[in-house]
Image: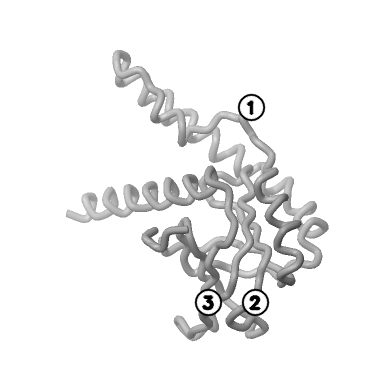
């Protein structure tokens, strides 16, 4: 896996648990057996498939669908909260510091050491119905903003999830540029 992916500063919930090297294969099979949500509208991909002959109408449609998608994601998060407690019962819950398509940095409760293997699950704020699963290995433990943080390199992650992380970074960049333009 390439180390050339740019880190995205973002804070969202992540669930992780330590696993043994023997458990890596079982986790790997589950990562590549990820359920597809092809039946749900995905405004992220819709922007790439818009016919430009109806430019303003298409833009209005995408904006409307983006609002609907955000509201549905909010409802999904609310409905999932009860099930998360059961599903992630043996997992630790924490928050990310940054993420890329090849690694994730998160707040560590001082129980992780360099070389530990992890099973990781998280939901990006832009797509709360897509659970991103990965296996990772702790490569560094460091201090950031008064917190103990861990750097974990992904060992196995689905390619579609990598693309979703990259797209998430592009959306954040676009929002930052828009806010800078408004300040000028």
Q: Earlier in the sequence, mark 3 or mark 1?
A: 1
- Residue at x 68% of width, y 68% of height: 93
Circle 2 residue: 116
Q: How many marks?
A: 3
What is the crowding at mark 3: few (fewer than 14 residues within 10 Å), some, or many (at least 20)? some
Residue 24 in the image: x percent, y percent? 70, 63
Q: Nearer the viewer, residue 173 or 7?
A: 7
Q: Residue furthest top?
A: 53
Q: Which mark is residue 139?
A: 3
Front residue (pair 51, 181): 51
Q: Quadrant of residue 20?
A: bottom right
Left or right for 62, reference 139: left
Q: CA distance from mark 2 to mark 1?
A: 37 Å
Q: Quick one: label 3 or label 2, which is nearer the N terminus? A: 2
**Which element is circle 2 on?**
loop
Q: Find numbered disc 3 in the image and state the secondary structure of the residue it sits on.
A: strand
Indicate whether 144 appears above or below 131.
below
């Amino acid at each position: 896996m390439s180390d050339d992916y740019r880190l995205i500063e973002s804070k969202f919930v992540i669930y992780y648990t330590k696993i043994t090297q023997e458990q890596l294969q079982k986790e790997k099979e589950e990562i590549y057996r990820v359920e597809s949500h092809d039946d749900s509208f995905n405004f992220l991909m819709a922007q790439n498939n818009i016919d430009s002959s109806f430019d303003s109408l298409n833009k209005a449609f995408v904006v409307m669908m983006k609002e609907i998608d955000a509201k549905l994601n909010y409802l999904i998060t609310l409905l999932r909260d009860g099930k998360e407690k059961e599903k992630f019962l043996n997992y630790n819950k924490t928050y990310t510091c940054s993420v890329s398509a090849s690694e994730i940095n998160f707040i560590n409760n001082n129980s992780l050491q360099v070389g530990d293997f992890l099973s990781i699950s998280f939901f990006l704020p832009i797509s709360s119905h897509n659970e991103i699963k990965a296996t990772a290995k702790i490569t560094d433990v460091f201090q950031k903003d008064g917190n103990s943080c861990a750097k974990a390199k992904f060992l196995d992650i689905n390619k579609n999830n990598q693309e979703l992380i990259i797209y998430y970074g592009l959306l954040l960049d676009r929002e930052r540029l828009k806010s800078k333009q408004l300040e000028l």
